[in-house]
Amino acid sequence: MDHRFVGPRYTVGVEEELMIVDAHTLDLVSAIDSIVDEQPPSGQIKPELLESVLEIATSPCPDVPTVGAELVSLRALARERARSQGLDIGAAGTHPFARWEDQRVVSDDRYRDLVRSLGFVARQELVFGMHVHVGMSDAEEAVQVANGLRNHVPLLIALSANSPLWRGGLTGLMSSRVPIFRAFPRVGLPPRFEGWTDFERRVETMSNCGLIEDYTYLWYDVRPHPRLGTVEIRAMDSQTRVEHTIALSAFVVSLVKLLTEEFQRGEVAPEPPWEILDENRWVAARHGLDAELFELESGERRGARELTGALLARLAPHAQELGCERELEGMEDLLRLGNGAARQKMVYEANHDLRELMAEIVARTA
């Protein structure tokens, strides 16, 4: 398998899936064609599976401050194009009251093939995530770092949870996107790969026998991305506030640097059994920042806030070396004031007004 794990290390790229809504009713609108026009000078605005979803994708940036500026610019451009058509954009893990039955699939062979092969499972995937790509310079290193990131997926879900409502009501979860997307095949926690050769062999086995076209049909929470030369973290809900997107990006790239250097020193952290990691993942989606996650080192459950604080202390020198210490400070704001899910619940529970909540999401997205 060809790959581009040739560096430079720790470049950052971010993808955000956003909602296209009517500016007055705040309903989702199948209007991607009116927003995807000529491409911006840097980054991309492109379709996703459904016509009411747009994706903004930055270019590979040398650092988090640069990727943050590009995200702000891309959001502003998407909003400007939407508003010229009487539309607007919003960012969260789910739309609070939209129904998947009302959405149209884009006119694209890949996505229509997905609907043909997955049926209802593909059609009901009306969720919005953010992906962070971090550049790597060695294939073996990329696989081992992806392995190490598996331990941290539940914490990333807890921090980024931003989808407490679905189809017009509270779900009892802080991230409804996680179980909704779990209906897809080849999602959730990835298997642990022994190394690049093992990853390559297992992917080629699946593609050669026709189970998947290529590795991009592995929609795991974290995966090596050979074509881009990155490790891609796919576990997080889209963030309403761009500051939270940027802070989480700084958190992720600093974590990748920590894991890379540990691997280079021959330090491989033990990990809990798969079933415990998967249970942590569920608890994180259910409770968000109030989750208590099992920690192998102590053999006990610890709160997501406590675990984040301890990890931030380890990441601080790496963030300083990467030039994103200021952006990483945004995690303190997220811990202090709450994540997107906590904000959504507070707004909704005041009046139980779904459109008031969606208006809040649109305003804070801007």
Image (cartoon, rainbow, N blue to C red):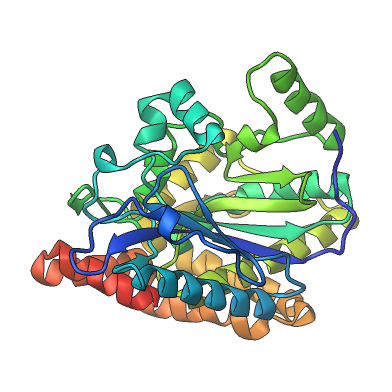
Is residue 270 something one can see in this rendering? no
The image shows residue 152, relative to residue 12, as above or below, that is: above
Residue 237 is situated, as x and y percent measured from the top left of the image, at 45, 57
For residue 206, side relative to residue 282 (left or right): right
Front position in the image: 37 or 311: 37
Task: Count the numbered circles shown.
Answer: 0
- Which residue is located at x 61 percent, y 68 percent? 249
**Residue at the left extreme?**
351
Q: Quadrant of residue 317?
A: bottom right
Residue 111 placed where, x, y %? 50, 35
Residue extending furthest toward the top? 209
Q: Nearer the viewer, residue 361 or 244?
A: 361
Inspect this view and state whether residue 240 appears.
yes
**Is 62 or 256 nearer to us in this picture?**
62
Q: Quadrant of the N terminus?
A: top right
Question: Residue sitting at 17 percent across and 52 percent down?
Answer: 169
